[in-house]
Amino acid sequence: MLKESIQNTRLGRFVTRVTRAISARATTFSSSYPRLASFFGVLKRRRRPIRLLLHLVLHLAGFVFSIQAVMQSRTEQGAVAWALSLNTAPIVAVPAWLVFGYSEMDSYNATRQAGLEKTRPFAEKLIGHFGNKEMDSSEAREEQAFESLATIASLPFIRGNEVELLVDGKNTYRSIFEAIDEAQDYILIQFYILRDDEAGGELKERLIAKAREGVRVFLLIDDYGSLHLPGGYLSELREAGVAAHYFMDLGKNANRFQLNYRNHRKIVVVDGHTGFVGGHNVGDEYRGQHPVLTPWRDSHIRITGPAVKTLQIPFIEDWQWATGKVPAGLNWEVAEDEMVGGKEVLILASGPADPMESCSLFFLTMINEAQERLWIASPYFVPDDKMVTALQLAALRGVDVRILMPDLIDSTLVHYSSFSYLEDLEMAGIRAYRYQKGFMHQKVVLVDDSLSAVGSANFDNRSFRLNFEVTGIVRDREFNAEIADMLEEDFANSKLAPATDYTEKGFFFRLRVRLARLLAPIQ
């Protein structure tokens, strides 16, 4: 009776008609293509053995890849997470490992070394010219820290520079566009994200105009970050004479480099005299036009002087990786009239191909050097255990340690992860703040009165180990006072994030937080 009632409904009659139609089509297909129908019949009967074979292959692949994960992952937590998932859930973990885990770095290392052969003479010249500074005994400890940073960067602090702090997108774009308009010889420009919107259109028009004037323009962007950039954007630039490339060029070299390794650098160099580095990409959101993440709070720096030439080194290494060539005829000579200021600048480029974890070592050196204050602003605060321990030790020796994070978020996983650190931070006397006046995206570190850093590196596992980053480190009390004033205003526009924001929440919130933190070390 129930079956008949269902069949008599409108839905039941519709399903019956569809079933009869499919059956009729199947009968017609079988009579018209008997061999093909026979093949599908055999395939249907063999579906279960094929499925078992597929599962066996995935489990074997998961086992092999888990060995690779154990041998190659840079953290124990990452190795354990990959090994467990590859062996227990290979149907999901094996494709994820192929895309986000395993990467053949040998090819990049070989290309990078070839690039270093071309840049090493210039670097050695700078080291000889700027690196041998006599040290007063009272400044020995401070100088030792600076020497450590220079060793990590394989470059010295370069004196004779002027550095301008650029707060937010309006000031940053104005300064970059002015420098581009004044270019006489060449422009090197590299961004993680480039959008075809108002900001991206303005940049494109300027680059096309300079290329038509005879200025050489080299544009490099990341495939993943600029995934939604239409092909026509680069085509217009190339037609005008701009040399424009993707870092990985996945369309032509799908297996060349895994998506987990991204070029997160933001570099602009004009004629070897003026350079820019910081947190801004190119898009309308950086001008505060995002529908949700607004106002957009970010920081950048403009460098004028001989240190700009060292900013060319990571660019040409990346360019050679992407194109197989090194831009010729760049300005590498340091003239006396280029010594325009009294600020010392170190350009530190870091990436997954470095022999050591350069980005991690940079942050650890900055943390360990702090004696009075250590202020860190990062939109993605997901440190590993050794970074948390270093922050705690700094606070325990009396350093004023403050962490600035966004309250408005663009990553749910990172947002939940950040709650898991609040208890450990507060226990050591570290103050964590959540920015309230829009989305905070700047990457800034301030140490005492003499050292600050503005760049692309976040305080998270991705920047520590997976991304290609670049940071401008400035040694100057006057400039650091500007950084301190800027951060003081940011703290005033923030609220404290006490441990109770985590400990007094419900069970399921705390469970989401812990699960999010577990995913952080996966490489």
Image (cartoon, rainbow, N blue to C red):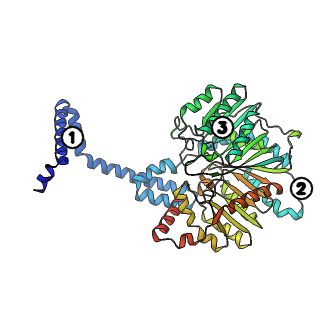
Disc 2: CA contacts within 10 A as few (<14), some (14-19) or many (>=20): few
Q: Is residue 146 visible?
A: no
Figure quadrant of the C terminus = bottom right
What residue does disc 3 label? 319
Q: Earlier in the sequence, mark 1 or mark 2?
A: 1
**For the residues marked 3 and 1, what is the alpha-carbon distance in whole angstroms?**
54 Å
Q: Amino acid at mark 2?
A: Glu
Q: Earlier in the sequence, mark 3 or mark 1?
A: 1
Q: Nearer the viewer, mark 3 or mark 1?
A: 3
- Is 464 rendered above or below residue 318? below
Disc 3: CA contacts within 10 A as few (<14), some (14-19) or many (>=20): many
Q: Amino acid at mark 1?
A: Gly
- Please, what secondary structure does the residue beneath circle 1 have? helix
Q: Earlier in the sequence, mark 2 or mark 3?
A: 2
The location of residue 308, given as percent across then percent down, is: 77, 43
- Is 184 rendered above or below residue 457? above
Q: Which mark is residue 41?
A: 1
**For the residues marked 2 and 3, what is the alpha-carbon distance in whole angstroms?**
36 Å
Which is more toward the observer, 217 or 439?
A: 439
345 left or right of 248?
right
Figure quadrant of the N terminus = bottom left
What residue does disc 2 label? 134
- Please, what secondary structure does the residue beneath circle 3 have? helix
When asked about the image quadrant of residue 139, the answer is: bottom right
- Please, what secondary structure does the residue beneath circle 2 have? loop
**For the residues marked 1 and 2, what is the alpha-carbon distance in whole angstroms?**
84 Å
The location of residue 452, given as percent across then percent down, is: 75, 56
Q: Amino acid at mark 3?
A: Trp
Name the outermost residue toward the left.
1
